[in-house]
Image (tube, rainbow, N blue to C red):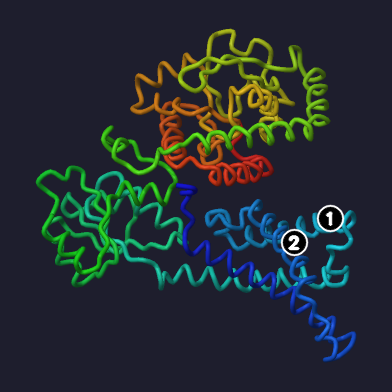
Amino acid sequence: MIFQRRIPKWRLVLFVCDSVLIVGALLLVQIGLELSRSGLGGLGRFDARVLLPKMALILFVCQISMYLNGLYDYKSVQSRGLFVVNLLQAIGIAYIVLSLIYLVFKSVSMGHTACILGLPLILLFLFLWRSAYRRFLAAETFAERVLILGSAPLARALVQHIGEVKDCGYKVVAVVAEDNPGESFLQETRFEGSIVPLSGFPSILDSVPADRIVVALRDQRGKLPISSLLDCRFRGIRVEEARDLYEALTGKVAIEDLRPSWFIFSDGFVRNKFTLRVKRITDLVVAGLGLLLAAPLMGIIALLIKLDSKGPVFYTQDRVGEAWKDFTLYKFRSMVKDAEALGPQWAKDRDPRVTRVGRLIRKYRIDELPQLINVLKGDLSMVGPRPERRVFVTELAKEIPFYPQRLCVKPGVTGWAQIKFHYGASKDDTVEKLQYDLYYIKHMSLLFDLSILLDTIAVVLSGKGAK
């Protein structure tokens, strides 16, 4: 298992088409320039070996900038106005980055004129294509039709998620509710499709065809229509557990009513010595380079902290790491001195204990830069579950099922839960983050780590998730 982070198929289509349009715009500009200079004879001077690497560089910078500006997150670009702002920002940043690269490496440039003409054309192509793409998704013409068998909480969660994320590739066409006639389901999810009682399955398939049946019964004992589902399988209709589809769509493991046997027999949770060694080498390289590059910024932050409030520059705290081992965590101090004089407390929105400089460095996660020292020491990995204090870990391990299992891997400076969910401020938030942590542990891989590091850059630049 190298990489199991699921990417919606229509998002892949979006990425491929964006790439084709960017390259196409650059080719059109280059052809236009050659025609204007030398007429039709100029086309014979195209040298693909020289041109393609230059276009590949522009494509790479544009795609990274678009990704970091949220243009591949459906929820962040549902508003046309927000999409236009993000697109202009992404292409503008790409232009600045390319200009800096060309100043140092002039040989990789396609030429000043080509860039001046190419980027506006890229903007136009992407705007027209993305507008058509939004209408295409709204039509749900090629979405896979899903029938949900059952009305357990997971069924509600799936209906809400699929309804919100239009590019997930699915459309819920019907729900077979265990409670008749499913009024509570309608009220909670605002589902507009067909809802029938359990006795109406599988006759509903004649009037509402489905490509996939997702089983989400509260209790399958004595209720699961084995014969009907077997018939559906032989008719080519896919049948799967709601928990599996939920995991694939949301990137988290639903732990409600989850039995230990699921972990025991589930795919995933596979790690080998080679992967762990490469992960450690990657940690050392990234942390070493990070400290070297961030040294000037860390010096400025240290000075600002001393000027802003009384107390030390660094804040140290004991945390629980892999296999319940304690270690000392390093951070820039972002709270007033003696912030926990009354005992350990959860972080809160607009926490009054946070200083002015602390609020800034928390917003952009700069307070966590000293944790790179922990990575070099081996206490942390660059990617992993967030390390917590023993007093909280002991309490949560008693109250939340499977919470101790997150301690089977080394904690991280960043992680899947950190980029997908805000700082935990309650037990409910901790449960939510645990579901992401378990997904990461199940699918942990080098490529997954790299994608999380890239997402972390986007989170840091946007200032999301801070308290």
Label 1 sits on what residue type?
Answer: Ile
Residue beneath the point at 12% across and 49% down:
223
Q: Nearer the viewer, residue 244 or 76?
A: 244
Q: Nearer the viewer, residue 84 or 130?
A: 130
Tell me where residue 108 appears, x and y as whole percent.
83, 63
Residue indicated by mark 1: 101
Left or right of 318: which side holds 50? right
Find out whether the residues at labels 1 and 2 contact each other: C-beta distance under 8 Å.
yes
Q: Are there few (<14), some (14-19), or many (20+) residues within 10 Å of tag 2? A: some
Label 2 sits on what residue type?
Answer: Leu
Residue beneath the point at 69% across and 75% down:
24
Q: Nearer the viewer, residue 439 or 408?
A: 408
Q: CA distance from mark 1 to mark 2?
A: 10 Å
Q: Are there few (<14), some (14-19), or many (20+) residues within 10 Å of tag 1? A: some
Quadrant (top left/top right/bottom left/bottom right) for the C terminus: top right
Classify residue 370 by image quadrant: top right
Tell me where residue 334 appears, x and y as whole percent.
68, 22
Residue indicated by mark 2: 57
Residue beneath the point at 30% across and 49% down:
242
Mark 2 secondary-structure assignment: helix
